[in-house]
Image (cartoon, grey):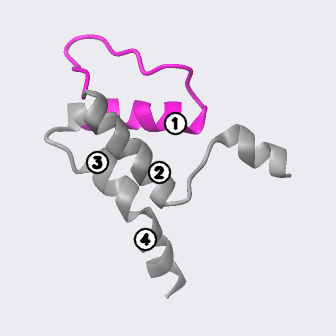
């Protein structure tokens, strides 16, 4: 039951990052997630990867928020 609870909590992130049109889009989505967490400063991409656009970025950021996954620096400050 606890594992299922965690799975359900992370499902929005899984869908936003990994259930995209291709694995290449998933790579870009993951980088955007790392930016949202404060782990990367930017999600610069090179060919053959393509920018996912502002709408996708907002969806990814919202998914992390829905899962309760915040910035790393906020977690460190709470300790």
Q: Percent position (x, y) of residue 15?
A: 29, 55
Q: Which mark is residue 46?
A: none
Q: Percent position (x, y) of residue 28?
A: 32, 29
Estimate how packed mark 2 is, as few (under 14), some (14 to 19) or many (20 or more) residues with alpha carbons within 10 Å: many
Reply yes or no: does residue 29 show up in magenta. Answer: yes
Residue drawn at 73 percent across, 44 percent down = 74
Q: Earlier in the sequence, mark 4 or mark 1?
A: 4
Q: Distance between the residues labelled 1 and 3?
A: 16 Å
Kindly identify which residue carries mark 3.
18
Residue drawn at 19 percent across, 15 percent down = 48
The residue lying toward the viewer, choosing from 73 and 47, is 73
User: From the viewer's perspective, is the residue at label 1 or at label 3 nearer?
Assistant: 1
Evaluate if marks 4 and 1 touch, with contact meaning CB atoms under 8 Å apart.
Answer: no
32 sits to left or right of 59: right
Residue drawn at 43 percent across, 21 percent down = 43
Q: How far apart are marks 3 and 4 (CA)?
A: 14 Å
Q: Is mark 1 on a helix, strand or loop?
A: helix
Q: Which of marks 1 and 3 is nearer the N terminus?
A: 3
- On the question of residue 27 being in view, the answer is no
Q: Residue 36 carries which label?
A: 1
Q: Distance between the residues labelled 2 and 4?
A: 13 Å
Evaluate if marks 2 and 1 touch, with contact meaning CB atoms under 8 Å apart.
Answer: yes
Kindly identify which residue carries mark 4.
7
Kindly identify which residue carries mark 2.
64
Q: Quadrant of residue 26?
A: top left
Q: What element carries label 3?
A: helix
Estimate how packed mark 4 is, as few (under 14), some (14 to 19) or many (20 or more) residues with alpha carbons within 10 Å: few
């Amino acid at each position: 039951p606890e594992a299922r609870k965690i799975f359900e909590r992370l499902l929005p992130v899984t869908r936003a990052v990994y259930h995209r049109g291709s694995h290449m889009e998933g790579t870009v989505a993951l980088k955007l997630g790392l930016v949202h967490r404060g782990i990367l400063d930017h999600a610069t991409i090179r060919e053959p990867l393509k920018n996912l656009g502002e709408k996708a970025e907002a969806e990814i950021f919202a998914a992390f928020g829905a899962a309760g996954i915040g910035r790393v620096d906020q977690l460190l400050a709470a300790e």
